[in-house]
Amino acid sequence: MSALHTTSSPVPSPDLLSANVIEILRRHGDHSSMALALNQGVDHFLAPGGAGMVAYRRIGKTMVQICGPFCSSEERDRTLDSFLGFARNEGCSVAAVQLRRGDVDAYAKRDFSVNQFGCSYSIDLEQFTLKGTRFMKVRNKISRARRLGVTVSEAPDEGENPELSAIDREWLRGKGRHVNELAFLVGERGGSGAPLRRIFVARLDEQPLAYVTYSPVFGSERPGWLYDLTRRRPSVPPGTIELIFVTALEQLRERGTEWLHLGLTPFVGLADEFELPDARSALITFLGRQLAEHGEFVYPARSQEAFKLKWAPGTVEPEYIAFQGGPSLRATLGLLRLTKVIPW
C-alpha cells in the first residue's frame, strides 16, 4: 500500500495506514469495487477528522480517483472538497472513475464533466438458482468439466505463488499483444488486501488450470463478495471457469453471503437515460461509443458483458467517469495510460 495524505495529522506507519484504510472501508465500503482501494500503488487521502477517505493514483499532474469518497453521505461534500483542495495545493487536477449515480451530482456541481463509463452487475444470492432451461448450457458445461476430473478448492492468497503466477503469464500471452489488462480497475493478488481476499483454484490431476479471486464488499447496502480477478491457461477444459463460479457461489451462500457482485464492465450498457445532459462531455460520449462499437481489439468488453449476463444478474447499475473542468488532453491521456487502454 502506498502513502496516506491528510491535512491535519502526520503520516502513520504502514501497519497503521492499512488498519485505518480497512476500518474506513468496513464502515463505508458500499461500492462493489471498494477493494481496489487496497491495490498496491494506490494512495489515500484522509479528510480532516478522519470522517472520510479518497483512494487515488497520481500520474503526472492528474490525480485519478477510484470510486467516490468512502464516507457517510453526510460527509461526502466535506471529504470531496478537502480532497480537491489537497489536489489543488499539489498543482493537480482530478479525474474520477467508477462513480455511482449517487456520487455524480456532487461532482457536476463542482464543475466536473460527468459521463457514463459502463455498467456493473450484481446477483442476489437469495434469489439465484441454476434451475430452468436458461441455465441448461451452463449446467452441461459444468458437468463436462467435472466428468473430466476438474476440481475446485479454496487456496490462501499468498501473493508470490509460483503456480498462480505461471497461470498469469500464460493468460496474458494468450490474450495477444493488442489486448491489454485493464490495470487500475482490476484486483490483484497479494498486497495489503490479501488477508481479506479469497481465491478459488481449479485443478486437473493436481495441476492448477485457472483461478478466480473474490474480494469483500462491506457497507450496508449490498454486502457480499466481488468476483474479481479471473486467470486461466489457454487450454483449460470447457466449463472450468463456470465450475469455479458455481463452487464459490455455493460456498459463499452457505456461509450467509447475501450478494455476489460481478463488477464493472467499461464501454457497455451506455444509454442516454443514464447520462447527465447538463454535465456530460461530448468528447467522452463520442469516445465511449466508439470504444463500445469498435474497441474489442483493445479491451474485450463484449465478451466480459456476455459472461456476466449469462448468470442473469438482477441488478445492473451505471457507473461514471468525471473530469475536473472537463476532459483535458493531459488528463484523458493520463487516465488511458494508467488503465493501459493505451500501452505507452
Image (tube, grey):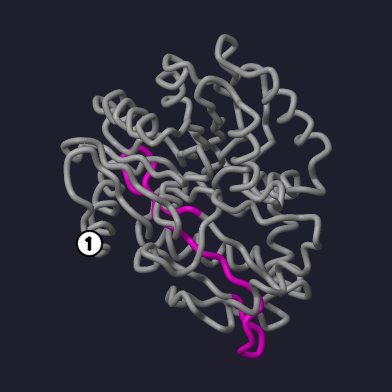
Query: Horizontal placement of 299 versus 24: left or right?
Result: right
Extent of the magenta region: 202-226
Residue placed at 77% from the left, 72% from the top?
Answer: 234
**Quadrant of the image occupied by residue 211:** bottom right
Majority secondary structure in the magenta region: strand
Total marks in image: 1
**Quadrant of the image occupied by residue 176:** bottom right
Inspect the image, locate mark 1, and give the three-letter code of the amino acid beneath it: Ser
User: Where is residue 12 shown, x and y percent of the image?
Assistant: 21, 56
Vertical side of 79 occupied by 232: above or below: below
Q: Does the magenta stretch include residue 203?
A: yes
User: Where is residue 90 shown, x and y percent of the image?
Assistant: 38, 36
User: Where is residue 3 shown, x and y percent of the image?
Assistant: 33, 54
From the viewer's side, name the closer residue of 90 and 225.
Answer: 90
Vertical side of 10 occupied by 89: above or below: above
Residue placed at 47% from the left, 46% from the top?
Answer: 57
Query: Horizontal placement of 176 versus 326: left or right?
Result: right
From the viewer's side, name the closer residue of 250 and 294.
Answer: 294
Query: Horizontal placement of 255 versus 243: left or right?
Result: left
User: Where is residue 147 shown, x and y percent of the image?
Assistant: 71, 79
Say which residue label 1 marks. Answer: 13
From the viewer's side, name the closer residue of 169 and 245.
Answer: 169
Q: Residue furthest bottom?
A: 205
Q: Does the magenta stretch include residue 291?
A: no
Where is the N terminus found, in terms of image quarters?
A: bottom left
Vertical side of 241 occupied by 156: above or below: below
From the viewer's side, name the closer residue of 343 and 298.
Answer: 343
Residue placed at 65% from the left, 42% from the top?
Answer: 336
Residue placed at 48% from the left, 61% from the top?
Answer: 214
Please tell me whether mark 1 sits on a helix, a strand or a loop: loop
